[in-house]
Image (cartoon, grey):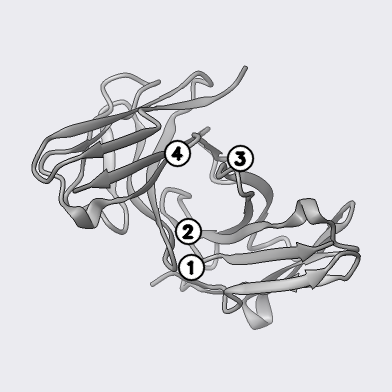
Amino acid sequence: EAQVTQNPRYLITVTGKKLTVTCSQNMNHEYMSWYRQDPGLGLRQIYYSMNVEVTDKGDVPEGYKVSRKEKRNFPLILESPSPNQTSLYFCASRGLEPLETQYFGPGTRLLVL
Amino acid sequence: AQKVTQAQTEISVVEKEDVTLDCVYETRDTTYYLFWYKQPPSGELVFLIRRNSFDEQNEISGRYSWNFQKSTSSFNFTITASQVVDSAVYFCALSELTGNQFYFGTGTSLTVIP
């Protein structure tokens, strides 16, 4: 089954404790992206990647890092989480063409205390 | 700068009524892409439709229809004969020429009352 998986689905952590949210897709997609969803703000793009070792900033990259060492994986790293990073995070993937369907993962709900 | 505005934060309708969700966008690009997504209460994001800026044909899919008007920079979504299962948050999104950067609206929460 074609899918995007994220782990963990729920995470409670404390300020400053480094964490990684994993994202993996099994569709051999070149493009992957991370978004955060906050009430009243919709979804905002954090980072995207066009292929292995090619990443770029979205609208709200501050406080986040990403890496793309393998085509199927695109982890989101919070080196020193802060309470304003409490949010619902979505990973997505898509083929190369802009009009191709972007498939979203199930979301990771993060609470930073 | 790209921007997507969904001015309707919340809408409630009675089942079987028609409802239109508005989406207005801003972009300086001549080539761009527009999308609608549905987020039901379970939380996942479901793709509904995509359009490129050169295709102004309206589209109908069952009870759903979309009206794309470049002249008013709008890409509105109409649900005909709404059903309770249509209750969800609906997002309009814009992607620029390369398709790399996405801009979502703030979403419209639709409640269909039985």
Q: Kindly identify which residue carries mark 3.
A: A101
Residue at left 62%, top 17%?
A1
In screen coordinates, is A57 left or right of B16?
left
Numbered disc in front, either 2 or 3: 3
Specify whether disc 2 shares its chain with disc 1: yes
Residue B25 vs A101, above or below: the answer is below
* Inter-mark Cα distance, 1 to 3: 21 Å
Q: SS class of the residue under badge 3? A: loop
* Inter-mark Cα distance, 3 to 4: 17 Å
Q: Kindly identify which residue carries mark 1.
A: B29
**Crowding at label 2, few (<14), some or many (≥20) Cα neighbours within 10 Å?**
many
- The image's mark for residue A107 is 4
Q: Are marks 2 and 1 in contact (CB under 8 Å)?
A: yes
Residue at left 71%, top 57%?
B87
Of the pair A18 and B26, the residue shown nearer to us = A18
- The image's mark for residue B96 is 2
Q: Is residue A45 visible?
A: yes
Specify whether disc 2 shares its chain with disc 3: no
Amino acid type of the residue tagged 2 in the rendering: Glu
